[in-house]
Image (tube, rainbow, N blue to C red):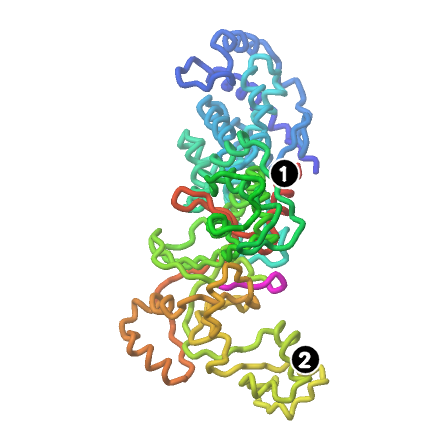
């Protein structure tokens, strides 16, 4: 694209350059090093009085001008034409606010050079030496820098819809020209940019973690690397890697005892230290030093820093407002949090989709609760599991307590079905309520195109495991009856006695939710909790790909 400004653009050059410099007068609060002195301004104004700037033809603006790549070239002509080509950045305070905002973008894991930091530093420090064309370009680049910075804060540098085939969170919309007008009218560019920075507590905590891990990465010495070759190490076993495991744990703050190279037994004190480490880093807390534990121990502070940067970017993709009352599921950490007015009032363990059947990222709103639910088999499970099993086992359908319905809704017996026919794929398979039903006693529905919901499970013991990516995509919730009770808290007729009667009846019962509760299925692998940075296993192996894209340019 070659974006050329019409001749009207040049009519503001004399006004722009004159006002640009006349606004650079003495100010005790000026940003040092990026503005001209008062004496330089006087010389420039004298020079402008006799200059025929309009006679020079400005060469035009494209996506790349003077070795500067513009992020929002398509918006520039539009915004300036609406302003009748009058300049925006005539007030020094506005320019300095933007420059400071660009500098501090590092606090959020953004790269200031993406917003023309070096160019603006040089041009704003040497305004008196710039010709009219360079001054006009500075005006344009200031606007492009504002648009780029505000856009990245608002919705991230990357577009997740271009990364993932399944992404159910709508992009955060922003009116960039409107936001710029607001900042100019309020004479406060910093406030304008701050208005689109994520306000969620997880994002704020990640900023604190970023500061911490930058220091750790800068000051950290070469870590002890543990060999990943060899079998898992179990209690009381001998292994030559034990001394290095102790050294690495000591570097990370989990071991404060003496380290003797000849002591190679995996004794009880070391087992306790390993369990503490496993708990913090989302590893199965079994005390066994397996490949996953060693791989995690070998991660450096730089690796963790990159992980934090990735998660800051994720939170710029997520909704700005999660709702006064909402449920948020962190897929990677196997946790569900119920939040009211900023306070987490309940936390539940969860099980989520396997690597092959990932739980998608999306947002929706709770609609109803179903007690004693039936289970309509999702298409993927129907094709991959149910039909092949029924074809090979004549008792499979009755043993699983399945009902079969054809396209007309007619109920069929398993003996009536031609399991070799392609038509069987169009049938609906439903598992009736009962002890074998994988949905357990209750499911919480928020209608969505992914057919995902929260539900109970008869396999309660699985919640005791740390690694819980074991479902077919839906989210199993520990103590989900308590969560359902909270969702019905504004309907006193559904007290404990009433719900017990419903459950004891075995009858499928649907209750509509009357309070507004949003549900967000999100994915993040780093956060700050009670002043400590925590990490979860990247169960869907997404972090490295995002970091690569963030740093591609």
Which disc is residue 388 wearing?
A: 2
On-image quarter of the C terminus: top right
For the point 59% across and 45% down, the residue is 158
In-front residue for pair 100/543? 543
Q: Is residue 160 magenta?
A: no
- SS type, badge 2: helix
Residue at label 1?
551
Q: Residue at position x 47%, y 82% from top?
A: 433
Circle 2 packing at 10 Å, graded few (<14), some (14-19), many (20+), is: few
**Drawn side of residue 165 relative to residue 326, left or right:** right
Residue 182's place in the image compared with 58, above or below, is below
Q: Position of residue 470 (x, y in %)?
A: 56, 65
What residue appears at the point 58 percent right and 54 percent down from the top-left corner?
233
Percent position (x, y) of residue 269? 46, 48
Q: Looking at the rendering, in which quadrant would you find the N terminus?
A: top right
Residue 172 visible within the image: no
Toward which corner of the image does residue 182 lie, by quadrant? top left
Residue 319 location (% of width, % of height): 47, 51
- The count of marks equals 2
């Amino acid at each position: 694209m070659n974006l050329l400004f019409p001749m009207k653009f040049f009519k503001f050059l004399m006004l722009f350059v004159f006002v640009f410099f006349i606004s650079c007068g003495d100010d005790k609060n000026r940003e040092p090093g990026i503005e001209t002195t008062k004496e330089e301004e006087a010389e420039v104004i004298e020079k402008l009085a006799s200059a025929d700037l309009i006679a020079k033809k400005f060469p035009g603006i494209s996506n790349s001008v003077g070795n500067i790549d513009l992020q929002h070239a398509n918006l520039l002509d539009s915004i300036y034409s609406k302003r009748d080509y009058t300049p925006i950045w005539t007030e020094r305070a506005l320019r300095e606010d933007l420059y400071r905002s660009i500098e501090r973008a590092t606090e959020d894991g953004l790269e200031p050079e993406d917003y023309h930091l070096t160019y603006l530093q040089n041009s704003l420090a040497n305004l008196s030496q710039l010709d009219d064309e360079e001054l006009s370009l500075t005006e344009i680049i200031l606007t492009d820098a504002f648009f780029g910075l505000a856009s990245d804060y608002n919705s991230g540098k990357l577009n997740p819809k271009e990364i993932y085939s399944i992404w159910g969170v709508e992009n955060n919309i922003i009116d960039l020209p409107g936001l710029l007008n607001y900042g100019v009218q309020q004479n406060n560019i910093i406030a304008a940019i701050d208005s689109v920075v994520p306000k969620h507590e997880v994002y704020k905590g990640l900023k604190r973690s970023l500061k911490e891990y930058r220091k750790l990465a800068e000051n950290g010495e070469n870590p002890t690397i543990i060999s990943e070759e060899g079998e898992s190490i179990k209690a009381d076993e001998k292994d030559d890697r034990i001394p290095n495991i102790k050294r690495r744990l000591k570097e990370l703050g989990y071991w404060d005892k003496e380290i003797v190279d000849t002591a190679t037994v995996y004794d009880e004190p070391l087992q306790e230290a390993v369990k503490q480490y496993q708990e913090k880093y989302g590893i199965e807390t079994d005390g066994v030093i397996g490949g996953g534990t060693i791989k995690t121990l070998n991660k450096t502070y730089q690796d963790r820093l990159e992980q934090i940067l990735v998660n800051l970017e994720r939170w710029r993709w997520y909704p700005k407002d999660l709702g006064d009352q909402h449920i948020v599921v962190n897929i990677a950490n196997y946790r569900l949090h119920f939040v009211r007015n900023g306070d987490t009032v309940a936390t539940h363990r969860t099980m989520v989709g396997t690597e092959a059947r990932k739980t998608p990222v999306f947002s929706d709103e709770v609609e109803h609760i179903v007690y004693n639910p039936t289970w309509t088999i999702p298409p993927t499970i129907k094709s991959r599991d149910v039909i092949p099993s029924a074809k090979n086992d004549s008792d499979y359908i009755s043993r699983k307590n399945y009902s079969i319905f054809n396209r007309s809704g007619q109920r069929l017996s398993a003996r009536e079905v031609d399991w070799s026919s392609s038509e069987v794929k169009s049938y609906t398979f439903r598992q009736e309520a009962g002890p074998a039903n994988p949905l357990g006693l209750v499911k919480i529905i928020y209608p969505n195109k992914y057919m995902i919901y929260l539900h109970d499970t008869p396999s309660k013991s699985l919640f005791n495991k740390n690694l819980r990516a074991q479902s077919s995509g839906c989210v199993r919730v520990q103590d989900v009856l308590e969560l359902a009770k909270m969702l019905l808290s504004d309907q006193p007729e559904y007290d404990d006695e009433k719900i017990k009667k419903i459950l004891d009846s075995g009858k499928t019962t649907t209750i509509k939710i009357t309070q507004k509760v949003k549900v967000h299925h999100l994915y993040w692998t780093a956060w700050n909790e009670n002043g400590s940075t925590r990490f979860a296993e990247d169960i869907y192996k997404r972090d490295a790909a995002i970091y690569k894209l963030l740093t591609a340019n």
